[in-house]
Amino acid sequence: MKLKEATEKLYNVFGKYYVEGNIRERSCHCCVSNEDIKELLSKPLRKLEEKDLKHFMFSAISTFGDVQDYKHFLPRILELMQNEECEFIDDFIIFEKLNYSEWETWDLLEIETIESYFLSLWTHLLSDEKTSFRQLNSMLEIISKYVGLNKALTIWDMYCSNQSVLFIVDFIWNSNQFINDEKTDKLYYWFSTSSIKDKIQNLFFTTEDKYLASKLSIVYTIIENYKT
């Protein structure tokens, strides 16, 4: 599913939720000020910016509104992740709210819509030459947590442009391959497959950038010698 289509589906599926009555009554008087509430409700949903939603996202459900309020704002929160400068994409507290709200107990269509959006955004980031390493790394964490690492790797393998290969190289270059855990093992097992090694090798033989060639050579050696 294209990212634009996945985004619109978020708004359509969660469009039935709205801020009902007075959110003040569902918020902590000590933690949430009237100004916080005013800022949150100051604009139409699709016009809200990161600064308008930040306090709500940190405190949603626990001290600021309830699950229905959270579902109302969720499409815009997820949409803002598309912006390269947005901090939502790499904030653990914000994305732990899905688990805090017990999202796996929601309607199946809602669950599938969120998963589909994450997969579409992951695909988009892998194919966009402007994607930063921070975005890629953060989105990999999110999609591994909420959709599954296997699905993330399946999509990653499909996008075989030089840019996506560079993402893999950067991931290995910036990570600690000596960490022993299930996720690291699974990633490096995938990195060490013939398909990925061939892509790195092909880029090595075609690049005219000496620094990149040296980096590719080192990364290739790392995955060649990685032992699970």
Image (tube, rainbow, N blue to C red):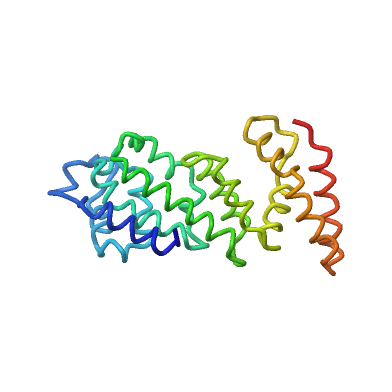
Splitting the image into 4 quarters, where does residue 204 fall?
A: bottom right
Q: Residue at x 27, y 57 (%)?
A: 12
Observer-nearest of 209 and 35: 209
Q: Viewed as shown, does residue 62 lie left or right of 115?
A: left
User: Where does residue 71 sit, x and y in percent of width and height?
Assistant: 28, 47
Q: Viewed as shown, does residue 202 lie left or right of 40?
A: right
Q: Residue at x 51, y 62 (%)?
A: 85
Q: Residue furthest left?
A: 21
Q: How many marks?
A: 0
Splitting the image into 4 quarters, where does residue 166 fall?
A: bottom right
User: Where does residue 163 sit, x and y in percent of width and height?
Assistant: 67, 62
User: Where does residue 23 sit, x and y in percent of width and height?
Assistant: 19, 47
The quadrant of the rendering that contains the N terminus is bottom left
In this picture, is 69 found above or below 184? below
Q: Viewed as shown, does residue 79 lie left or right of 191?
A: left
Splitting the image into 4 quarters, where does residue 15 fall?
A: bottom left
Q: Residue furthest bottom?
A: 208
Q: Residue at x 32, y 41 (%)?
A: 108
The quadrant of the rendering that contains the C terminus is top right
Q: Residue at x 24, y 47 (%)?
A: 69
In this picture, is 76 found above or below 208? above
Observer-nearest of 63 and 7: 7
User: Where does residue 197 sit, x and y in percent of width and height?
Assistant: 78, 49
